[in-house]
Image (cartoon, coloured by chain):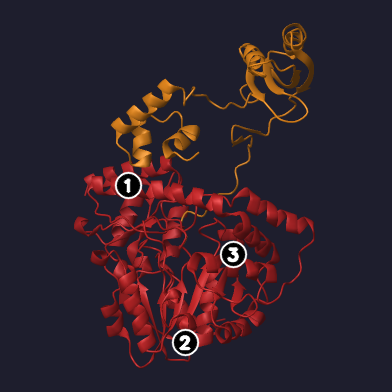
Amino acid sequence: MDYSKKISKQVAGIPRSGIRDFFELVQGRDDVISLGVGEPDFATPWHIREAAIYSLEKGFTSYTSNLGLLSLRKAISRYVDDFFKVNYSADSEILVTVGVSEAIDLALRALINPGEEVVFHTPCYVSYLPSIALAYGVPVEVPTKKEDNFALRADMLEAAITPQTRVLMLNFPTNPTGAVMPVDELEKIAQLCVKNDLIVLSDEIYCELCYGEDEHVSIATMPGMRERTILLHGFSKAFAMTGFRLGYACAPAPLIEAMMKIHQYAMLCAPMTSQAAALEALENGEAAMLEMRESYHQRRDFVVGRLNEIGIECHSPGGAFYVFPDIRKFGLSSQEFAMRLLEAEDVAAVPGDAFGQAGEGFLRCCYATSLDELKTAMDRIERFVATL
Amino acid sequence: MKDPLLKLLKSKARFSNAELAEALSLQVDAVNDQISQWEGDGTILGYQAVIDDEKAGEMGVAAFIEVKLTPERGGGFDRLAMRIARFDQVSSCYLTSGGYDLMVVVEGQGLRDVAQFVSEKLSTLDGVLSTATHFRLKAYKENGFIFETEEPEGRLPVTP
C-alpha cells in the first residue's frame, strides 16, 4: 500500500524533528556525555513519588473531573496567586492537562481558524511551529538576538503583526536559550497585545528556575492582560516531574471552556496518579525545589565561566537549565560543529538550528547533569576547539 | 545547611579546594581560608567515607544502646556523656529526649565485643541506671546515602 497517500497533508507537511535525527546518532555510541537532554537530572523528590504510590495503594485509579481534581485545582489556584500574583478561580479558570505540551495544542486548536497567524519568538521549543501548523494556523517567527540576550524586542514583534494575527506565544525563561524578559520590554509587548487585540499563550514552565536578583514577572499581571492571557505552567521542570506528564492552563472561563471541549474528548482527564503527585508537590515541594534550583544555579555559573574561558562566547542566561553559546567564530554550521564534537570527543550538544533558523551558529548545552560530567565535558570541548 | 561551601563538602569532601572553588564559582584563596578557619574553630570536625560494610567484606557489628543516667548538679548529663563518648568503641553519642537519656552507637568486631563493652564498661559506670542494646541487622541509609544497588533506567541522551 502506498501509505504516503494515506497520511493527511497536514501531517505529511511537517518536517522530521532535527532533535530526533541527532538523538539516533547519539544513541548508537557508548561513553557519550550528553548535554542534549531537556529535563532535570534529579529524580522526582521522594515525598512526591511516595504520594503517587500512596494514591495507588488507596485505589485512587479512576477518572477525575475533566478539569482535574478539584483539590489540585484549588492548590494550583493558591500557588499561582502566590507565585505569579494573578488570581484564577479553581472552579472555572484552571484546566489540568497532560503536560504543557497538551495545553499548547489545546489552546491553539481552540483559538485559531485556518489561515490565521500565530507569532512566536525563535529560537524556541521544538513543538511550537508544528503545533501551530497542526492547528491550521500560519506560523510567523520573530527572531531574538544574542545582543538582546535572546529577549523578544517589542519593535520586532510589532513589525510582524498583521491584521491576520490572532495569537502571540511567549516562552520565558526560554528553552533553548535560557532567556528572560526585561520587565520594561515585556510591558511594551503587553501594550502591543492590547492594541492589536491578541491572545497571549504564555508558556512559563521554567519560571521557578530564575537565577537573577529580580523575581519572575508574568505578562498576565500587566494592565489589560489577564483577560487575554492563557498562562501555561506545569510540574516537569521545577519539581523534576517530566515523566508524570502534568501541566495546567489558567485563563478566563470562556477560554478554558473552549480548551476543555477538546480535552474532554481527546484526553478525558490527566492521569490521577500524576495529579496526586502534583498536589503533594504544591503542598510540600518548595524546599526540595529550592534545593534543586540552587544546584542548577551553581552549575550555570560553572559552565558559563568555563565556556568563556575556553574562548566560546556565552552569555549568562537568566533562567531554565540551558546555555546557548555562540560558535560562529569557528566557521562551522551548528550541525557540523555538533557532529564533529560528538565524533571527536563524545560530547552531545544540540545544534541551535534545531530550534529554528535563528539558532544557527549556536549550540544548546543543558547543564542539568552532574558536575563531574560537566567538568569532563568542558575539558573535552576545550580540547576539541583547540583543533579547529 | 545554608552555607553552599559546607553543603558541598558534605557530599564531596574529597574535592580539592580548587575543585570546590570551581564548582561554586569562588576564588581558590577564599575557599582555602574559609576551610582552614572552619577546621581551626572546630566547625569541621573531620572527613569520612561512607562505606557499605557488607560490600567491603567487613563483618563488624553495630549496636544502638539506650542508656538511662542519673543527672548531676551543675553539669546535668554532660560529664557522664562525655566519659562514655570517649571510648573508642563508641562511634556516636547523643543526648535525647524521651524514654531514655543517651543514644550510644557502638561498633565492634562481633557480638562479644559489644556485649563486653556494655557489661564491663558502660553499665558499671556510676550514674548509669540501665541500658538496652539493639543490634543493627541491616542498613538502608547512612549519612544521607541510600544502600542501593539497582540503577534506574537513565534519561534519554537527547530530548527537546
The residue drawn where x is 26% and y is 64% is A146
Name the kind of residue labelled 2 in the image. Answer: Tyr
Instruction: Pinpoint the chain carrying mark 2.
Output: A
Distance, label 3 to label 1, CA atoms, is 36 Å
Examine the rendered structure and indicate whether residue A173 appears above or below residue A105: above
**Chain letter for the red colouring in the rendering:** A
Foreground mark, 1 or 2, reads 2
Classed neighbour count for the residue bearing mark 1: other residues with Cα under 10 Å, few (<14), some (14–19), many (≥20): some
**Residue tagged 2:** A136
Name the kind of residue labelled 3 in the image. Answer: Arg
> Residue A46 got which mark?
none
Q: Secondary structure at mark 3?
A: loop
**Residue tagged 1:** A344
- Discs 1, 2 touching: Cβ within 8 Å: no
Q: Secondary structure at mark 2?
A: loop
Instruction: Pinpoint the chain carrying mark 3.
Output: A
* Residue B19 pos. (x, y %): 36, 34
Q: Is residue A282 left or right of residue A307?
A: right
* Residue A24 pos. (x, y %): 46, 59
Instruction: Pinpoint the chain carrying mark 1.
Output: A
Examine the rendered structure and indicate whether residue B72 appears above or below residue A89: above
- Discs 2, 3 touching: Cβ within 8 Å: no
The mark nearer the N terminus, 3 or 1, is 3
The mark nearer the N terminus, 1 or 2, is 2
Distance, label 2 to label 3, CA atoms, is 25 Å
* Residue A48 pos. (x, y %): 64, 54
**Chain letter for the orange colouring in the rendering:** B
> Residue A245 got which mark?
3
